[in-house]
Amino acid sequence: MSKTQKLNRRDFIKSSLLGAGALAAPAWLSQVHAQVTDRPLGANDDIRVAVIGIRGQGNGHINDLLKIPGVRVVALCDADSAVLRQRVAQLEQKDVKVKACTDMREIFDDPEIDAVSMATPNHWHSLGTIWACQAGKDVYVEKPVSHNVSEGRRMVEAARKYKRIVQTGTQCRSSRGLQEAVAWVQAGNLGKVNVARALCYKRRDTIGHVQMPQPIPANIDYDLWCGPAPMEPLMRKQLHYDWHWVWATGCGDLGNQGIHQMDIARWFLGEKTLSRRVWSAGGRYGYIDNGETANTQLIYHDYGKKALIFEVRGLPASASDGKMDNLKGASIGVIVECDEGYVVNPNYNSATAFDWDGNELKKFSAGGNHHANWIEAIRSRKASDLTADILEGHLSSALCHTGNISYRLGKLARADEVEQVLRQLPHMLEAGERVWEHLQANLINLEQEKTFLGPVLEMYEKQEFFVGNDRANAMLTRDYRYPFVVPKYI
């Protein structure tokens, strides 16, 4: 019996209700949307952009947008008033005057703003994008586009319903070199594609350990900073950036750096849904701190005759070597294995094809401007002109989320128990053996340190929920704080 046939009425109703019952958008937003209409944009019209979340990646957004002809940065928003003042002052030095605010709802309420470029922490991506779409504004949203699977699907629905141009911040999609490499592989030049191995070998040190709540800096509006996430005491030394390593706000390096490689791997595979089975195992090895996400993790996505295998390593090559491991010359990249050879993508813009004897067959290398592509699509009003439409961002982000769900549902296990599962998953044993050697080189004793062995989760991949696992399905969404509620339907 097929999985579609096994979908009973109770499961179908449960999946449908996953998208129902949330609070609607705030009243002020529906009033704004009722007043906003698309401003006709001619070839010479400026596009007025606000940047939301400007401490780190958002500062890069500002600088990228300033270089694009016909674009004006007209507003900045951040819950950190100190960062906000700093960025405003930097723009004033360039004779660029902007509106400044700490609450992004002021941006959505402003009819003099056409589009927003968003680089907030992950937990704000979905709601900020949905509110912007409802207010009639186009959106560039950083990766991962969501904090959970349901959020991403709601973003796709909002973009379509309100006819907005929504670009995902996976800038590799605008690389002409990678576009050519993917097309070349999918044309069959290396035969059938079998496996895409995505690697995120990136050093991540401890974030330290505190045993009591830390003070919130006076320049932070903590209510606005938390937004849809629980407004809990700060139990880490640093509010900024280290939010990546706690589940309430982040997704670990699988969803931070790794989303780029997850997206490239799925792109090469040519898959347009979630996987039919997902599994993960790993741990936070080598130190004890306030971080919750894995610093070493294996993820398996089953696409039937194809597999997507992901590896996260935050520790160095060994306890005595600060360098990072690599596989076929890639530390942060993707290796695509085909019948007649393989392709190595060692960075954002390039790829090289080899036969199985190691002979180089073809090189691909050229960049692209991701924000410029977004602006071009805003002018054409065609989502198809985007290199990283929100649907692509949702699918790749969701692969990170489902991998983390398996990991978070894991139980403490011995190394031989992990190996037993690896032997049952095609192409996985070799990856597991390499991880074992990596941990041994870092003096990690797997009989003493925690290893979480996740369950193999089966999915209705097109419906985007798990088969017969209520705990896993509950993690496809989350509870929200009023009024920062991501709607369950659009």
Image (cartoon, helix red, strand yellow):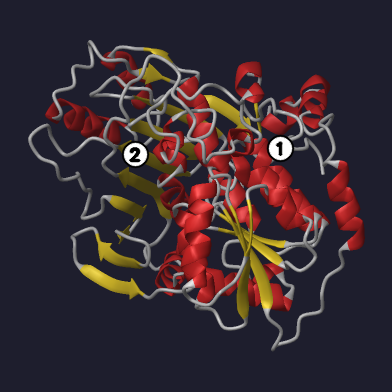
Residue 199 locus on image (x, y percent): 33, 46
The residue at which mark 2 appears reads as 311
Q: Is residue 262 above or below residue 469?
A: below
| Snapshot quadrant of residue 354 | bottom left
How crowded pointer 1 is (Cα within 10 Å; few <14, some 14-19, many 20+) is rated as: few
Residue underneath mark 1:
463
Which quadrant is the C terminus positioned in? top right
Q: Residue lying farthest left?
A: 320
- Taking the image as shown, residue 300 lies to the left or right of residue 337, namely right
Q: CA distance from mark 1 to mark 2?
A: 26 Å
Measured from the top left, where is residue 356 in percent x and y?
23, 58
Above-or-below relation of 104 to 447: below
Residue 326 pos. (x, y %): 21, 48
Task: Give the vertical position of 387 relative to 212 (above or below).
Answer: below
* Residue ID at (61%, 77%): 71
Towards the viewer: 331 or 227: 227
Three-letter code, disc 2 = Glu
Q: Does the image show residue 341?
A: no
Say which quadrant the N terminus sits in: top right
Question: Going 15% across and 45% down the picture, which residue do you hit?
Answer: 323
Q: Where is 466 relative to 119, above or below?
A: above
- Picture coordinates of residue 424, whole percent (x, y): 39, 25
Q: Secondary structure at mark 2?
A: strand
Q: Which structural element holds mark 1?
A: loop
User: Which image quarter: residue 188?
Assistant: bottom left
